[in-house]
Image (tube, helix red, strand yellow):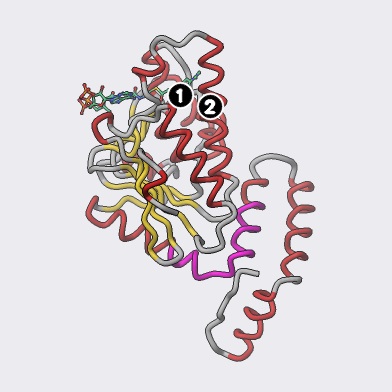
């Protein structure tokens, strides 16, 4: 994954962990067409990468993760164009969510509107103390367009989602922790280190098992328990065709650490 392929993203490999930084600090990393297109391109490349085992997504600077969809770019849109923009946003969020690699959002400041939606398309959210979350779309005459009305009530209690979506108010990092939107709140100076540490831990586990677990986890938010369990049985059985299943269990029985190949 080369930095030179992107103008609005910084990508940096740390062994099996890829750190992706949205880099438009002058606009508080707001999501315009270019950022969205580049995120989609990155995600397409990642899904076939056997080198990257976990991803950390963050924003440039100490002020914002992503302050939203780009209001300047949206201001003059007519409905047809808005639909196209929302479709692009949805493709990006769906694509990140369905990556085989787990994605950790390291929320280093404002995560508003499209920024909160982007964070919610990641599997795990860690926040800096100065992080602020919100879906302020109703304040500017619109509603969430990148999945916020659907992903937020799947992550936090319905009434909390309703208040956040309908009031347009921001939440502090402590409030986001209390409602379970984020897993941990960390000093800004420790956010990236801790996010990478968790990513490295995940990257050390059996990769196919991690990917299938992520798939089952996301299925749990969609259909019935019976359908989810049917998928779980299927995915579980498929893992017994991997070398890593043999290795993981053999290593346990031999009392030594496993060495995984990702197949
Ligand atoms: N878009 C574009 N530019 C933004 C931006 C945004 N979302 N947020 C900040 N900026 C820009 C500011 O305009 C400013 O630019 P300059 O004036 O320097 O050129 C620069 O970033 C620094 O921001 P501030 O000067 O405002 O910084 P402050 O510290 O004073 O305030 C703030 C920080 C985050 C509280 C404030 O910038 C703010 O309120 N930003 C807007 C936050 C917001 O409302 N975000 C949600 C956007 S709406 C849809 C598709 C998508 C969506 C909806 C519908 N369809 C297609 C149907 C999604 C909507 C959203 O995400």
Pinpoint residue 72: horizontal percent, then vertical percent.
34, 17
Pinpoint residue 227: horizontal percent, then vertical percent.
78, 46
Q: Nearer the viewer, residue 187 or 55?
A: 55
Residue 180 appears in which quarter of the rendering?
A: top left
Badge 2 marks a residue whose secondary structure is helix
Q: Main secondary structure of the magenta part?
A: helix
Locate the C terminus and report the quarter of the image it occupies.
Answer: bottom right
Q: Residue 40 carries which label?
A: none
| Residue 231 belongs to magenta span | no
Which residue does the numbered mark 1 point to in the structure image?
165
Locate the N terminus and report the quarter of the image it occupies.
Answer: bottom left
Do the residues bearing badges 1 and 2 touch, measured as CB atoms within 8 Å?
yes
Residue 68 appears in which quarter of the rendering?
A: top left
Which residue does the numbered mark 2 point to in the structure image?
149
Badge 1 marks a residue whose secondary structure is helix
Q: In this view, does 230 lie to the left or right of 263?
A: right
Q: In this view, does 236 lie to the left or right of 183?
A: right
Rounded to the nearest angstrom, the CA distance separating label 1 from label 2 is: 7 Å
Residue 255 appears in which quarter of the rendering?
A: bottom right
Q: What stretch is highlighted in magenta?
A: 199-215
Q: How crowded is mark 2: few (under 14 residues within 10 Å), some or many (20 or more)?
A: some
């Amino acid at each position: 994954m080369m930095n030179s392929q992107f103008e609005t993203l910084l990508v940096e490999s740390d062994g099996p962990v890829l750190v992706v930084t949205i880099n438009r600090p002058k606009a508080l990393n707001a999501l315009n067409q270019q950022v969205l297109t580049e995120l989609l391109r990155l995600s397409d490349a990642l899904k076939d990468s056997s080198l990257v085992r976990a991803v950390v997504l963050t924003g440039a600077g100490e002020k914002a993760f992503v302050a939203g969809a780009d209001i300047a770019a949206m201001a003059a849109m007519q409905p047809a164009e808005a639909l196209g923009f929302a479709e692009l946003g949805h493709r990006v969020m769906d694509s990140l969510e369905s990556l085989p690699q787990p994605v950790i959002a390291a929320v280093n400041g404002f995560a508003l509107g499209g920024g909160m939606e982007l964070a919610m398309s990641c599997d795990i959210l860690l926040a800096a103390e100065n992080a602020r979350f919100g879906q302020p779309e109703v304040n500017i005459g619109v509603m969430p367009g990148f999945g916020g009305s659907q992903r937020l009530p799947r992550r936090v209690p319905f009434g909390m989602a309703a208040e956040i979506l309908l009031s347009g108010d921001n939440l502090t990092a402590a409030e986001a922790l209390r409602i379970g939107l984020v897993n941990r709140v960390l000093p800004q100076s420790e956010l990236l280190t801790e996010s990478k540490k968790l990513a490295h831990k995940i990257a050390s586990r059996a990769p196919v098992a991690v990917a299938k677990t992520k798939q089952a986890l996301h299925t749990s938010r969609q259909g019935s328990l019976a359908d989810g369990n049917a998928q779980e049985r299927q995915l579980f059985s498929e893992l017994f065709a991997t070398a890593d299943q043999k290795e993981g269990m053999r290593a346990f029985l031999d009392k030594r650490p496993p060495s995984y190949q990702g197949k």
